[in-house]
Image (spheres, rainbow, N blue to C red):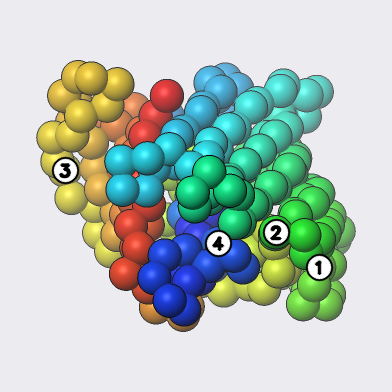
Amino acid sequence: MIRVYEELNRGMQLSRRGFVAISAGLGALALPRVGLTAATPADLTFRIMRKDSEIGTHRVAFSPTAQGFDVDVTIELAVKMAFVTVYSYEQHGRDTWSAGRLVGADYRTNDNGNESTLQARAENGRLMVEGQSGKLELPQGTMTDLGFWNEAIIKAPMIVDSQTGEAGKMQAGSGTVERIQVRGREISATRYTAAATKGRTGSVWYDDNGHWVKAQIITRGETLDYELA
């Protein structure tokens, strides 16, 4: 969840160097609340909104495998000023899940022309990660920061930034039940607030079945809203 995106224009609006993920994703939460042995989750598409204008999409697609499922994530953003694209961001990745754990990840990111990759593989009960920040050896249960489709991210032992390869723990508050609007109707949802490095904060909402239905990211005075399409 989101990844969470940052970097403001030094003068007024979003900078050309723009959005970088929040550590822990909103960009970026095992399976929903129904349990780790549940069926493959349903696909998700979120519109990314800034000041009531859509600037991109965040898509999550699930494919069953013999051992679990793959999660394909696509994030595409374009910030325009006077009809000219001043910043663009694209990320394509795949998380591989088996027996309720992340066992592999492959990501490619183009941050306004700056490209990076990240790979992760489970070996001997650990998750071996290699990215921009070098090589890391992390515990089982670690998730990538784009795992907010999964409510378990709130309690994950470690979170890996799918762009930079940095790792850290999510600082999330206890859930608060609220009434929110999703796809034009009011529903009950649990809201979690989370904080990350560099002053980034955000909230993520899950419905009564543990499905991700909304998110909001606040960074350097900018608010980005994730609306379920």
Q: Quadrant of the C terminus?
A: top left
User: Residue at (46%, 71%) from the top-left corner?
Assistant: 8
**How far separated are the C-alphas under marks 4 and 3?**
30 Å
Kindly identify which residue carries mark 2.
112
Q: Nearer the viewer, mark 4 or mark 3?
A: 4
Three-letter code, disc 3 = Val
The front one of 87 and 40 is 87
Which residue type carries mark 1?
Gly
Crowd band around label 4 with a 10 angstrom C-alpha radius: few (<14), some (14–19), many (20+): many
Secondary structure of the residue carrying numbered label 2: loop
The three-letter code of the residue at mark 2 reads Asn
Q: Nearer the viewer, mark 3 or mark 2?
A: 2
Label 4 close to label 1 by CB (< 8 Å): no
- Which residue is label 3 attached to? 177
User: Can residue 134 be spotted in the picture?
Assistant: yes
Mark 4 or 3, nearer chain start? 4
Distance between the alpha carbons at the discs numbered 4 and 1 = 18 Å
Residue 19 got which mark? 4
Q: Is residue 33 visible?
A: no
Of the image marks 3 and 1, the number of the one nearer the N terminus = 1
| Nearer to us in this view, 68 or 52 | 52
Task: Please tell me in which quadrant of the rendered image residue 115 appears.
Answer: bottom right
- Given residues 109 and 64, the one toward you in this image is 109
Above or below — where is 104 with respect to 72?
Answer: below
Q: Which residue is mark 1?
A: 131
Marks 3 and 2 sit apart, C-alpha to C-alpha, by 38 Å
Measure the C-alpha gap from mark 1 to mark 2.
Answer: 18 Å
Residue 144 vertical position relative to residue 185 in the rendered view, above or below: below
